[in-house]
Amino acid sequence: MDMKKYLVPFSGLALAACGNNVREMPNVIYVFPDQFRNQSLAFWNEDGYSGNVKWTADPVHTPNLDRFADESAVLSRAFSTCPLSSPYRGMFLTGMYPERSGVTLNCMALRPESTLNPDAVCISDVFAANGYSCGYIGKLHAETPMKNDPANPGHYVSDRNPEWDAYTPPERRHGFSYWYSYGTYDVHKDPHYWDTDGVRHDPEEYSVRHETDKAIEFLRNENGERKKDAPFFLALAYNPPHSPYESLDDCMEEDYDLYRDMTYEELYVRENADTTLSKAPSARYYFANVTGVDREFGRLLDELERLGLEKNTIVVFTSDHGETMCSQGTLDPKNSIYTESFNVPFMIRYPRKIRHRVDSTMLSTTDIMPTMLALAGLEDKIPHTAEGRNLAPVFLENGKECDIPDAVLYIRNLDGKKDKDGIVHGIFPEARGVKTGRYTMEIAIDRDMNIKRVLIFDDWNDPYQMTNIPYRENPELFAGLCAELREKLEEANDIWYREGIMDSLGL
Ligand code: CA
């Protein structure tokens, strides 16, 4: 695909001879709150959107995201391939599946093997090598905690046992020259960060507001946050609406007030929700944080417009995974193939080149890195290590000349063996699954390598996944889905493929 044909005429004239001249290249802002499910976007109930999904959106207030969607290409079927914090981040950064990115499990001190491969080529490495100024703000959670507290060398950053939070030193920042980040820490109104120089900050305010202020500083660039005449890549990783979601300590009261008086019947619109679960009161706080993210995201967009940057800036809004919130009878918000956990928001706004539309192309997490690089004009710089697809044509020209996936892979890993010190070695690949145009299927195994459970849902006729289609009684359907899964496992060079697990299960 010839990217040059999209250049605006005035810059094309002076810069045509320069190849990838930095002044032609778009800025990129990638915003990904944690645990924000696709169903928590109000616009899905509106004309122009509701026909693209078979479920009802949550009763949330997301006016800024609704407006943003009207200006964006919106995917109804973006999936978090391994819907868990750290594996997602490893995949987003590298375009590789967890076994190659290095991040196979949620990072914490007892899982030292699960950590971003320091030699992996990350999206930010590529942007930086091509003239971009790269900034990271918010939650990273892609590295094992190390005893490298800048203020207390030889120690973890806190005395939590085991440690989850982490400091990332400059040599492990993968091209990000502006840094304002932490590993993982879930106190929404008392967050902390380490800056570019390793200095810790404890701002004691709502993290989403604080991080948006830092992002606005990065945009304004009044203090040399980035190179003046270079394009920028900014990753903004909010923690809310991630748990905790139990009290006014966890969200802004002005946002909670929108949901305070709603009954469970009003809050829980999904037929598969069980409001007798202990978690039921959380919906009000979860939705309050959805609205808090919406408001701050809107403030970021306003500043982008005020600075005259919006036309040549690609802005993505997505999330690392969803949130079950009392659906499917589980208290676990994520790490499952249920649509509330697996399906994430994905919207791209790029006024110069992308027109508004709603698209049902299935996106996997590994596709994000190559797609983003190609949208920025760096298609020929996509590293050979990236394992996902470049889906930029889907956004630029309705998918012409593009290998559109007919199914996506699902991965769930659990801890491998633990040694006497409780250190985890390897992974137990508990479940693999596939989502096709119509069906969702997951096969879970026990540690003796027997089938533990098979889930099959008909997402056309049963969008809330209420009825598990028995696999033994539907051998043709099951065989077809197993064939799809095998294809995806091979494409991903997954451990289930390499170790012949489908064969050993007799599938
Ligand atoms: Ca997460």
Image (cartoon, rainbow, N blue to C red):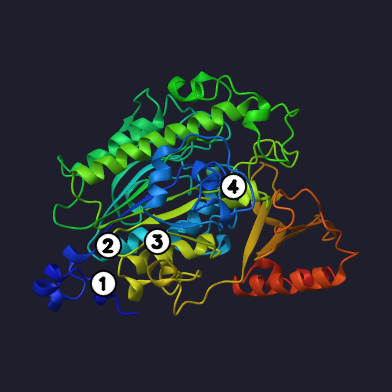
Ligand 1 appears in which quadrant?
Answer: top right
Disc 1 is placed on an element classified as: helix
Answer with mark 4 or mark 2, whichever residue precedes in sequence: 4
**Ligand 1 closer than 8 Å to label 2 CB:** no
Q: Marks 1 and 4: in contact by CB < 8 Å?
A: no
Q: Marks 1 and 2: in contact by CB < 8 Å?
A: yes
Answer with mark 2 or mark 1, whichever residue precedes in sequence: 1
Q: Residue furthest right?
A: 473
Q: Marks 3 and 4: in contact by CB < 8 Å?
A: no
Q: Looking at the rendered structure, which numbered label has been put on residue 133? A: none
| Label 4: few (<14), some (14–19) or many (≥20) C-alpha neighbours in 10 Å | many
Q: Looking at the rendered structure, which numbered label has been put on residue 122? A: 3
Please give the count of numbered marks on the rendered protein: 4
Going by the numbered disc 1, the residue's amino acid type is Tyr
Which quarter of the image is occupied by the N terminus?
Answer: bottom left
Going by the numbered disc 3, the residue's amino acid type is Cys
